[in-house]
Image (spheres, grey):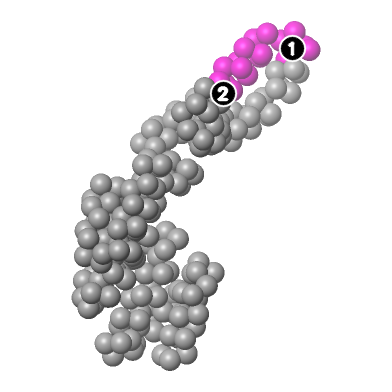
Amino acid sequence: NYFASYISDGSPAVIDAAFRIYMLPQGMFSVAIGTVLFPTLARYATRNDYDGLRAAMGNGARQMWLMLLPAAVFSAVMAEPIRVLFLGPTDAERRAYESALAVARRDNALGRARLAAFLDRYPDSSLADDASVVIARLELRAKRPKEAERRLREVLREHPREDRTDAARLELAKILAKRGDVDDAWEIASDIKMSLLRDAERRDAYRLLADL
């Protein structure tokens, strides 16, 4: 942590989180097996039953390997989703996203392009759903509802459990309601989790549901 603090302010926290993730399989499996195994080893040792002690120790070690090897393979294969789940976006992703947002506040078309470039570069980022929702809103301001609808449906399809998915549902339901597809709008709006919306979005959602 001491050396990491010279790299960036957030590096010690990242190392701490990585250590906790790394220790999770050991805490779940090795400690659980050891808790059951140690009294047995103590009992064999008290009786001077070294054959039983050796057999129990070997059996415990095999059980730990049986649990830890699949956990190691899973951690290696799912490294990126685990990083996103526990650590969120990297500093580079956050800087790129905030830079694209700053451009979007000044220029609609250029902002859409910058956010699209962000999605091309970081398609698996935890900010990908945020960027898609912002693009959809920019498309609506540019009077391009079909493009906005396409973006929002893409969010629901590719990021069904992200924190901005419900904002995407809200925007999509508003588009459908404005177009006259009331039944489809109601179906989508009724799935919105109000607790995951921001205050202004929550007010919009309640008004939309009342109108539908």
Percent of width and height locating residue 149: 26, 73
Q: Is residue 15 left or right of residue 165?
A: right
Which of 149 and 37 lies nearest the eye of the viewer? 149
Mark 2 = which residue?
A: 2
Tag 1 secondary structure = helix
Callout 1 crowding tier (Cα within 10 Å): few <14, some 14–19, many ≥20: some
Residue at 52% x, 72% y is 199
Q: In what quadrant of the picture does the C terminus appear?
A: bottom left
Name the main secondary structure of what is drawn in magenta. helix
Instruction: Give the magenta-colored segment's residue range.
Output: 44-61
Marks 2 & 1, CB-CB < 8 Å contact = no
Mark 1 = which residue?
A: 45
Residue at 23% x, 52% y is 117
Is-magenta flag for residue 57?
A: yes
Q: Is residue 102 left or right of residue 139?
A: right
Percent of width and height locating residue 53: 66, 13
Q: Quadrant of residue 57?
A: top right
Label 2 – label 1 distance at C-alpha: 43 Å
Is-magenta flag for residue 64?
A: no
